């Protein structure tokens, strides 16, 4: 079709409706599109704000679509997200009569051809100052312009790790004009919330919402108001990964610490177990500290680690003290009377602690209330092998003088010396055995105390996840 030749009205309507796909119809649309482009931008400047009255503000609507959360750097407090930014405004100088251009209602031109509002992300944390991608804009016959552009943004986000790994974060994305004030551009949000329709689920963060608010702020540098639109991204951390990789190993290791009290004192591994558990928890604490920002707020899991490490340090110190009691030699002082009554009598029954070397089924030796051995001694060695006579000599009990040689003084002195050594040895063994039993009762007592402490600490930390 030759230039300048117009189609009949009916044929023009069919071409505009797309019902007629003849080559002539397509050629007519293309030629009118080129003519429209030349006519629109012949005397157009993209440097000036497109309003007929410069005293009136230009309305600009903004809509953000969250497509993906790429990364959340807690240590550097930077949120990296993939957004779709939609801006719409009215250009008073880019209007046309669609009937004069073969019914063309809209065209798509490069965004550099038209004036664009300098909407930027205020809390940007990227070292690159480039804006949105250079995509086309949709230009309609009434002057409405719609600009959709994807953008990967890095924004600063104040991270609160007080309840890590059961924490939630609020990251704000504040958009506004960099040079135009509120008297020149009236920026408004199109919807009351960000669009999450096409959001790709994140493996670590769950998005609870993205409400939008419009703010008008007067800065100290300028007297004019500056409107902005702030999108608050509400995030909740998915704690399953941290529960199975940081929390549960710590809980299981913590339950090993009280078992150090159950180890026999002669095994030589009681202190080694406590130190090993302490080193393992220190490694877990360093792993948590590397990912957290250096701040005054200590994470919840960090508090649990510190409390557990303190408990294990106390248990190791108590183990050393109890081992010192266990290895009291024969020269140690006797067990005090209050300790015998409280520890050896009551606490030993409560914690099922029996004599050293016995179990719950072995019979006990007959003993009196004060813990001393009865007068029945093995092998017939009682407390009275020989008895001093009033005259300084000694004579055997129940031994007829005419039937044995016990009346000889030298033999009686030797036998008395041997009996005395035997009694001293048995008394020393009895004192050492009592101190060992005291150490064993204290081991059982502190084992249950620390088991209860670990259990309640674990219930408190797991209760935060419910």
Image: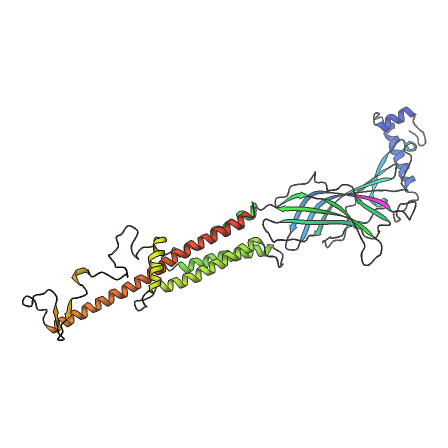
Compared to residue 91, the image places residue 263 above or below, namely below
Q: Is residue 69 visible?
A: yes
> Taken as a whole, is the magenta stretch helix, strand or loop?
strand
The residue shown at (29%, 54%) is: 358
Residue 366 is situated, as x and y percent measured from the top left of the image, at 24, 57
As rendered, which of 123 and 332 lies closer to the eye? 332
The residue shown at (64%, 41%) is: 201
For the view shown, which residue lies furthest in the left direction?
402
For the view shown, which residue lies furthest in the top direction?
10
Residue 133 is situated, as x and y percent measured from the top left of the image, at 77, 46
> Does residue 62 show up magenta in the picture?
yes
Q: Is residue 265 visible?
A: no
Residue 231 is situated, as x and y percent measured from the top left of the image, at 73, 46
As rendered, which of 380 and 208 lies closer to the eye? 380
> Does residue 244 show up magenta in the picture?
no
As rendered, which of 120 and 406 lies closer to the eye? 406
Q: Is residue 454 left or right of residue 242?
A: left
Q: Is residue 214 left or right of residue 291?
A: right
Residue extent of the magenta highlight:
58-64
Q: Count the marks: how many?
A: 0
């Amino acid at each position: 079709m030759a230039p300048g030749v117009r189609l009949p009205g009916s044929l023009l309507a069919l071409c505009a409706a797309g019902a007629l796909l003849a080559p002539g119809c397509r050629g007519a649309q293309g030629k009118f599109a080129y003519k429209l482009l030349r006519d629109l931008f012949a005397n157009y400047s993209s440097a000036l704000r497109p309003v007929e009255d410069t005293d009136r503000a230009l309305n600009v609507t903004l809509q953000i679509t969250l497509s993906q959360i790429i990364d959340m750097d807690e240590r550097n407090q930077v949120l990296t997200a993939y957004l779709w930014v939609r801006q719409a405004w009215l250009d008073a100088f880019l209007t046309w009569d669609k009937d004069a251009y073969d019914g063309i209602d809209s065209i798509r031109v490069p965004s550099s051809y038209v004036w664009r509002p300098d909407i930027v992300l205020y809390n940007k944390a990227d070292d690159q100052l480039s804006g949105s991608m250079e995509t086309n804009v949709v230009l309609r016959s009434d002057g409405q312009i719609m600009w959709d552009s994807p953008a990967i943004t890095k924004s600063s986000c104040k991270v609160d790790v007080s309840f890590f790994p059961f924490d939630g974060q609020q990251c704000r994305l504040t958009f506004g004009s960099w040079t135009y004030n509120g008297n020149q551009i009236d920026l408004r949000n199109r919807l009351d919330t960000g669009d999450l329709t096409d959001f790709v689920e994140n493996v670590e963060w769950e998005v609870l919402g993205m409400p939008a608010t419009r703010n008008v702020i007067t800065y100290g540098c300028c007297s004019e108001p500056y409107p902005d639109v702030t999108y608050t991204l509400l995030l909740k951390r998915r704690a399953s990964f941290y529960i199975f990789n940081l929390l549960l190993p710590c809980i299981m290791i913590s339950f090993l610490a009280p078992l150090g009290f159950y180890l026999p004192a002669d095994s030589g591994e009681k202190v080694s177990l406590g130190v090993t558990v302490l080193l393992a928890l220190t490694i877990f604490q360093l792993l948590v500290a590397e990912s957290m920002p250096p701040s005054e707020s200590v994470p919840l899991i960090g508090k649990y680690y510190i409390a557990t490490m303190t408990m294990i340090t106390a248990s190791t110190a108590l183990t050393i003290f109890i081992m010192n009691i266990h290895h009291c030699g024969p020269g140690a002082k006797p067990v005090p009377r209050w300790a015998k009554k409280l520890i050896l009598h009551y606490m030993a029954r409560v914690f099922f602690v029996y004599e050293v070397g016995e179990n719950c089924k072995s019979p006990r030796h007959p003993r009196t209330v004060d813990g001393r051995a009865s007068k029945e001694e093995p092998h017939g060695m009682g407390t009275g092998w020989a008895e001093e006579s009033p005259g300084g000599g000694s004579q055997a009990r129940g031994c007829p003088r005419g039937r044995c040689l016990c009346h000889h003084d030298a033999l009686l002195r030797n036998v008395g010396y041997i009996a005395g050594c035997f009694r001293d040895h048995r008394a020393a063994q009895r004192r050492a055995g009592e101190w060992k039993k005291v150490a064993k009762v204290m081991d059982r007592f502190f084992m249950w105390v620390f088991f209860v402490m670990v259990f309640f600490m674990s219930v408190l930390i797991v209760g935060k996840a419910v």
